[in-house]
């Protein structure tokens, strides 16, 4: 342990509560910002199509009213992808990337440092983190999680630098570009390294599967409370509750659970990128559809709900939850809980998204 367990629990609980409240607060203000102020991409089309002055001046510019500079404010330039990025990356790592970029002058001065070089650097960080994840010492595994969060920060930084050098406002996916593929491949390598490290740790330190009950209990195993971690078993030795050991979890079972969880991340990533492409083409890229219909769709509560689903069910959110489980030494319990149930959440999210996409497309195309 890096510090006493009780102290660690208090600090971690406070941090989690603070982050959740902060993300809800930012989501609320993001929705109000979209409703009440101009949106860059639609203002360009409004001016081009010479709409009536009522439409063009009905909403003020957000940059004129916010006290946080738009260079670091994640609410200034809402785009489809920005609405679908997970909360941690959008509201914490995004502004932090902007602050560090301004402080170090990476985009303007350090031209030798390309976004692809930053992408390659976070692969190295991932390999170091994966090695530490195999350690039996909890402190080493916690350091590994810190390194993987640094890796995710660097993953944000390469995109931020690329957009700044191209003078692009807001998050966007430039599908098909070299940077798009390099970033995706490096991200994939980092995630695979993390999963391999966890797999090797569980292989070398297999969780025990046992059951709780009184020493004189005659209840069959399925009526006793199942436990799945060595930590829980050790704690119960100090009580009057007996333990009936069954067996260690086999490596085959460990590999099966990890593969199923990894499959969720792959499917989530494919679906997440698919809906980003669909919404970008429908609302931001295609000028064949009337701008007012696209704009009203973007501002609608249904669209905010549709994108909000993918702020929660996307591959980055999976990594954040897994990182929290590793940090709390509950890796196996988390993986075992979600390796099937996660698919149910993913199927519901995809089905809901398909229904909403069809409704949005019908309105934007036909009115």
Image: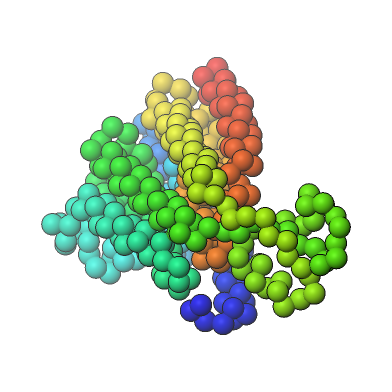
- Tell me what residue is drawn at x 51 percent, y 66 percent: 327
Frontmost residue, 325 versus 290: 325
Q: Is residue 351 above or below residue 331?
A: above
Q: Position of residue 335 (x, y in %)?
A: 57, 51
- Residue 26, image x, y percentages: 55, 58
Q: Which of 191/49 is in front?
A: 191
Where is residue 133 drawn, in percent x and y?
41, 62
User: Split into 4 quadrants, where in the image is the C terminus?
Assistant: top right
Can the viewer see residue 39 in this picture? no
Q: Nearer the viewer, residue 268 or 362?
A: 268
Query: Would residue 287 appear left or right of 60 to someone viewing this image?
Result: left
* Residue that protrudes farthest toward the top in the picture: 366
The residue at the point 57 percent across, 32 percent down is 350
The reply, left or right, for residue 211 in relation to residue 217 is left
Picture residue at 65% right of the left edge, 71% below the top: 234
Q: In the displayed structure, does residue 235 sit left or right of residue 308? A: right
Q: Work out whether 298 lies above or below 113.
A: above
In the image, 287 versus 356, the foreground residue is 356
Q: Residue at x 40, y 26 (%)?
A: 286
Asked if residue 252 can be seen in this view, the reply is yes
């Amino acid at each position: 342990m890096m510090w006493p367990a009780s102290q660690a629990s208090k600090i971690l609980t406070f941090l989690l509560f603070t982050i959740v409240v902060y993300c809800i607060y930012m989501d609320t203000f993001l929705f109000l910002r979209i409703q009440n102020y101009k949106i860059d991409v639609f203002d360009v089309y409004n001016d081009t199509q010479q709409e009536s002055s009522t439409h063009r001046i009905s909403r003020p510019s957000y940059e004129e009213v916010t006290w946080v500079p738009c260079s670091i404010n994640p609410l200034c330039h809402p785009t489809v992808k920005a609405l679908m990025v997970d909360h941690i990356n959008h509201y914490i790592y995004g502004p932090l990337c902007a602050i560090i970029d301004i402080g170090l002058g990476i985009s303007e001065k350090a031209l030798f440092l390309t976004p692809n070089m930053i992408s390659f650097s976070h692969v190295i960080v991932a390999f170091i983190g994966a090695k530490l994840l195999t350690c039996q010492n909890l402190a080493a595994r916690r350091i590994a999680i810190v390194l993987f969060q640094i890796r995710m920060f660097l993953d944000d930084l390469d995109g931020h630098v690329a957009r700044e050098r191209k003078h692009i406002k807001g998050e966007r996916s430039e599908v098909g570009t070299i940077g798009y593929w390099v970033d995706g491949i490096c991200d994939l390598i980092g995630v695979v390294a993390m999963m391999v490290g966890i797999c090797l740790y569980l292989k070398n330190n297999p969780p025990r599967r046992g059951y709780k009950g009184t020493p004189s209990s005659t209840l069959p195993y399925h009526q006793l409370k199942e436990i799945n971690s060595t930590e829980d078993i050790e704690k119960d030795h100090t009580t009057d509750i007996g333990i009936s050991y069954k067996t260690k979890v086999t490596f085959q079972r460990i590999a099966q659970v990890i593969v199923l969880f990894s499959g969720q991340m792959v499917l989530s990533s494919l679906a997440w990128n698919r809906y980003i492409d669909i919404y970008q083409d429908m609302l931001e890229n295609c000028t064949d559809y009337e701008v007012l219909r696209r704009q009203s769709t973007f501002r609608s509560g249904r669209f905010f709900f549709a994108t909000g689903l993918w702020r929660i069910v996307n591959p980055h959110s999976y990594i954040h939850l897994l990182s929290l489980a590793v940090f709390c030494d509950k890796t196996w319990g988390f993986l075992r809980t979600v390796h099937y149930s996660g698919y149910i959440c993913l199927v519901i999210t995809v089905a809901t998204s398909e229904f909403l996409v069809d409704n949005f497309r019908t309105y934007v195309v036909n009115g």
